[in-house]
Amino acid sequence: MFNPFNNINIYDEDQSNTVFRDVTLLALSGFVAIVLLLLPWLNLKTKKEIIKEPVGSVIIELFWPNDIDADLDLWVKGPNDGPVGYSKPSGIVFNLLRDDRGLTGDYTPLNYEISFTRGITPGEYQANIHLFKHDKNKSKIQATIAASLVTPDRDYRKQILEKTVLLSKEGNEKTVLRFKLDNNFKLISGSVNSLRKSLIGG
C-alpha cells in the first residue's frame, strides 16, 4: 500500500544533510579566513644571519716606575693604518685606552699606558715610546713595552713579546718593537726587530 508520508521523510532527511553540510563548510571557511587574517600578526621565528665583529685583539702596554713623575707616551701602528698616540687616540686598527701623564692629575699608583686593536689583522705592528716630559732628576727612565694577543681560539690573554729600554732625553722617541702576525694570528718567525721608524706626527 502506498504511503505518501514516506517521501516526506526522505525529503526532510536530504534537506537536513544539506543544511549540516553547508553549516560545516561555512564554519570551516570561517576558520580558514580567520587563520589567513591572523598570519601577518603571528611571530614566526626566522633564522637571521648574525654579523659578528672581528674577534681577537692585539694589546700593547707601556710601563715605567710608579715613583717617577715623568710623562711617557705610547705610540703604536697597525697594518694599513696611521700612528695612534696621545694626540691621535684612535685609528682604523688601534685605540689608545689610557694616556698617563706621570703623577700629574693621576689618582692611581700606576705609570701605565695601553692600546688595543679591534680584531687581529695580519701584517706589521709597531710600538714606540716618546719621553714627552722628564722628571726633575733627569735620570734614566727604564720603560717596558709588552705585546699580548687574545685570539679567537683562546679565552685568555697570552703575552708574546716584551722589551725594556732606557730613556733620558726629553723629546726622545724610541722604536721598541716591530713584529708581524700571519693570517692564523701567529707571530711570524724572524719578523721581530727594533729598526727605528718615527710615529710622532706621522
Image: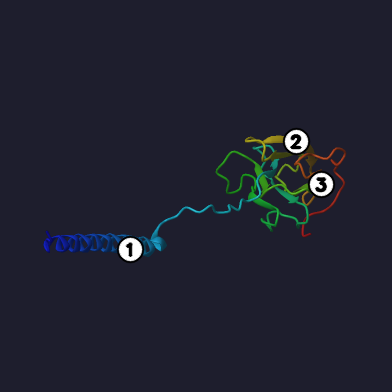
Q: Nearer the viewer, residue 156 or 31?
A: 31
* Image-quadrant location for residue 31: bottom left
Which residue is label 2 attached to?
Answer: 160
Q: Is residue 123 left or right of residue 31?
A: right
Label 2 secondary element: strand
Q: Position of residue 28 (x, y in %)?
A: 32, 60
- Tell me which amino acid carries mark 2: Ile
Q: Is residue 198 left or right of residue 95?
A: right
Considering only order in the chain, which callout, 2 or 3, is on the residue closer to the N terminus?
Answer: 2
Mark 2 in CB contact with mark 1 (< 8 angstroms): no
Q: Quadrant of the C terminus?
A: bottom right
Q: Mark 3, mark 2: which one is toward the viewer? A: 2
Pick out the residue farthest to the front.
Answer: 1
Q: Quadrant of the N terminus?
A: bottom left
Considering only order in the chain, which callout, 3 or 1, is on the residue closer to the N terminus?
Answer: 1
Render colour scheme: rainbow
Please tell me which residue is depicted at 40% across the width and 61% down the height of the picture: 39
Q: Position of residue 112 (x, y in %)?
A: 65, 42
Q: Nearer the viewer, residue 84 or 191?
A: 191
Mark carried by residue 29: 1
Which residue is label 3 attached to?
Answer: 175
141 relative to 28, above or below: above
Label 3 secondary element: strand
Q: Position of residue 184 (x, y in %)?
A: 76, 41
* Image-quadrant location for residue 22: bottom left
